[in-house]
Image (spheres, grey):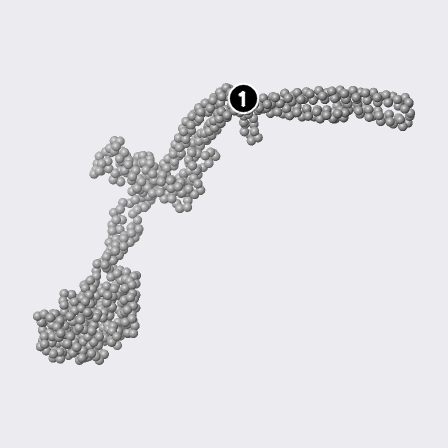
Amino acid sequence: MNEMASTSSATIGRVNGGAGDASLLVIRDVQENSTLVRYGRIARRWKWVIMGSIAAGVAAALIVTFMMTRQYSATTRIEIAREEARIVNIQGVQPEAGTVDQEFYQTQYGLLKSRALAERVARELSLADNRAFLDQHGITDTPGSLVNERPLDNSAGARQERLARVVGLLLDKVSVSPLRASRLVDVTYTDPDPAVAARVANAWGRLFIQSNIERRFEATAYARNFLERRLAELRQRLDESDRALVGYASAQRIININTPSGNGVTGERPITADDLVAYNTALAEARNQRITAESVLRGGAGAEQNVNNPTLGALRQRRAEVAAEHARLLTQFEAQYPAVEALAAQLRQLDRTIAGEERRVMTGLRSQVTQAAARETELAARVEALKTSLIDLRRRSIQYNILQREVDTNRTIYDGLLQRYKEIGIAGAVGTNNISIVDQARVPEGPSSPRPLINLLLGLMLGAGLGAALALALEQIDEAITDPGEMETLLGVPSLGVVPKVETGDPIETLQDRRSALTEAYLTIRTNLQFATPHGVPRSLMITSTHAAEGKSTTALALALVLARQGLRVLVVDSDMRSPSLHHRFKIGNEKGLSNILSGNARWNEVAQDAEFAGVKAITAGPHPPNSADLLSGPGLGTLLAELMGAFDHVIVDAPPMLGLADAPLVASKVGGVVYVVESFGVQSRSARIAINRLRNSGAHILGAVLTKFESKKAAYGYGYDYGYGYGNDKEA
């Protein structure tokens, strides 16, 4: 593509100053360099191959459609919930699915396509023993025999073989299609018999639900059996640990009592601990009593005042009252007054009574202190003894605690498993299920396949694809040059122009019409040659081609004609002494010509003849020499060309074709430029490249190539690739 683009740019540079028809040529060259246009050209060129492939694909699709057996599809729609219906709030054995549990649904889809389910359906419907079903699907007992030729083989091996083949058939014909963003799944079965299709689809959904329930029940039963074995083992271990604990407690004389705690959990503690607590409390009370008694006793004379004695308090209260009455009477009477004396005697008696009571109280306090000290000593000794006993009990309780923990652990595990065993039993008895059938399969009314429209579309697509592949392959195989842009990309030479093919008549006669497309084409070539060199059209030109009959002689004559119409003197030399054609074109004689000049038997002015066109002379090839290459390789050709350029403005040499001959390279090395003629659809690019390389090796100056006999329709340029030669051409005018 880069090479193509650069070559096109060079072409644009050569013709920017040319005529309007040359500009149209450049624009179309640039357009053809695009990939899409190139593929479009290939498609138009090989359109019949592509259309034939499409027709073949459509015909094959029609044949296949008519030959295919009608198939009927029945669909059962089921719902798969993530969680089962909660009849009781008890967890089952199988784990519950999460809110986004794709693994759960993928597992269910896999179970729907499992071989076990297909075998279950086959057994449920007895498909392995159904002769009609087996005949319809071509399932035989032995290879090479038809089922209906003999009775079914009911041996275990034969039935198992038929069942396996039926299961494989079911798995091939069933499809599982989850509905997007829902919990619904369509299970579709396809069969030539619509009734069988509906039966299998319904059985598939029903047995899937049944197998799901059975799978849950089997898991529950397995769990129950496992838990029963574990519970028996744990019960035995719990009994053994209990006996070991009781035996050790009895041997060590460890007695514990149950003590409820604040959180409702009941624990055990030894009786010694309770005794220690009780004796310790009693010791504290005894110590408090002793300290209180000693403090009262240490109070001395006022100690009795601190004693809480109701009798002593009543006496003191009475004395205070009598003293108050005695003091009152003294204010009125004398001490000798009888009432005053009576009260004084009563006060003295009360004082003696109080003193006696105080002595008795003090005696009691001393006795109380002595008793409290003795009790404190006794209780302290008991507490110490209990402490020693408790320490020894704790030492002996280490093993007891170990045995107790083992008993507690065994009891906890046993209780947990027992609770789980009861829950599983209840969950298994409920028999809940998370799968349900939404729509039962109905007997299909019409076939699901073949689908003529889809088959035709597929045939059309396959045919178009095959046609495109064939077109590309043929394009690669066919090396014929059909496009002026290909001369630049395939041959490496610039394009000077395109010459349309003349359908009828002589091209020379067509060239005489100045409004003809052929004349316009050679005018374009003349214009491009004018910009090919800094000095305009080279004075000496050689016209050659790869093979004969590609239009080189016509090109030589046409260029001479368009140059002569500019008032220039033009000479056409036929250097093809092996197969001359110039004298036929100009309708002149060939008795003397180039061979006579090069052999020294004549001069150019003696053999040059006037052509039928004004300003054009011609030198024919002359008699056929023994070896034309020897004549052309000599110095005579160069001398002749120098003389001719002195007498004419332009000398155009019609040279022999390139391949297989040495003549054209000999001439090319002595002229100012070479115009290479390529026949459209007539020459292979490989041959043309070889010929052009020979020219380059001879030192020739290749100005460019001309594509002759071009047919726009044949080249698939259906959008008017005619270079505008008919623009403004009014035939009637």
- In the image, taking residue 154 as reference, residue 117 lies left or right, namely right
In the image, residue 211 above or below residue 615: above
- The quarter holding residue 660 reads bottom left
- Of 494 and 722, the residue lying toward us: 494
- The kind of residue tagged 1 is Ile
Quarter that holds the C terminus: bottom left
Q: In which quarter of the image is residue 99?
A: top left
Examine the rendering and report whether any part of residue 102 can be seen: yes
Which residue is located at x 43 percent, y 43 percent? 100
Q: In this view, does 75 lie above or below 33?
A: above
Please give the count of numbered marks on the rendered protein. Answer: 1
Q: Residue at image x 22%, y 34%?
A: 150
Q: Where is residue 681 in the image (x, y as percent from the top left)?
A: 20, 64
Is residue 239 visible from the viewing direction of this image?
Answer: no
Work out whether residue 63 or residue 629 is closer to the camera in this orientation and state it. 629
206 or 285: nearer the viewer: 285
The quarter of the picture where residue 438 lies is top left
* Circle 1 residue: 255
Q: Nearer the viewer, residue 118 or 247?
A: 247
Q: Residues within 10 Å of mark 1 (few under 14, many from 20)?
A: some
User: On the rendered image, what quadrant is the N terminus found in?
Assistant: bottom left
Task: Determine the residue positioned at 24% across, 54% down.
Answer: 56
Q: In this view, does 159 lie to the left or right of 395?
A: left
Q: x, y percentage for residue 395?
A: 52, 24
Rendered location of residue 45, percent (x, y): 24, 61
Residue at disc 1, secondary structure:
loop
Q: Residue 632: where, in percent of width, then height?
A: 13, 72
In screen coordinates, is 38 left or right of 619?
right
